[in-house]
Amino acid sequence: MSTDDRELSAGGVVVRGDQVIVIVPTRRGAQGQRVLGLPKGHVDPGENAEQAARREVREEAGVEAELVEKLGDVRYFYQRDGQRIFKMVRFFLFDYSSGSLEDHDDEVEEARWMPLAEAARALSYRGEREMVGRALSAIAQER
């Protein structure tokens, strides 16, 4: 597999109490539907996954957050221009520290708080629902 066939992204599960930040990206899903997701994006040159996740949270959700722990990786394949791409998204659990959801960038239609338990059911992608489930478990162990 050549390096062109692999992509690394990173994302954040940002919590405040029993709420998590979810976003609706301007980019639609494969069938043209609105997507409910977590802030995430490509790891830029010179960044590690944690730094990329923190940056994406700031850009797509408008907030600053403190790292709690790595939650895990979501792996999948998708097609682009007839080519099969392997994608891995590394997710981190963050505690909200400051900022406003109104300050998100123009790649995001909406950013909002949602109860963690609801997000674990409502997010569009199974891997992201699983990451919110892991966040719920991690928070339950802390309490």
Image (cartoon, rainbow, N blue to C red):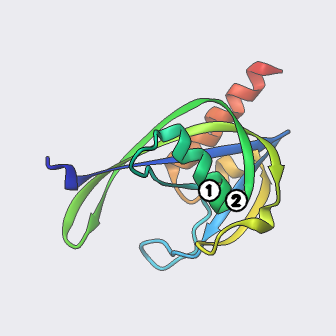
Residue positioned most to the left:
1
Figure quadrant of the C terminus: top right
In the foreground, 129 or 27: 27
Q: Position of residue 71 (x, y in %)?
A: 56, 32
Instruction: Please say whether residue 117 is visible from this viewpoint.
Output: no
The amino acid beneath tag 2 is Ala
Residue under the image location 22 percent in, 59 percent down: 84
Mark-to-mark CA distance, 1 and 2 = 16 Å
Q: Position of residue 72 (x, y in %)?
A: 50, 33
Q: Position of residue 66 (x, y in %)?
A: 72, 36
Secondary structure beneath disc 1? loop
Which of discs 1 and 2 lies nearer the camera? The answer is 2
In the foreground, 47 or 140: 47
Mark with earlier residue (1, 2): 2
Q: Are marks 1 and 2 in contact (CB under 8 Å)?
A: no
Residue under the image location 57 percent in, 68 percent down: 35
Image: 137 above or below 128: above
Q: Residue 61: which numbered mark, if any?
A: 2
Report which residue position mark 1 lands on.
123
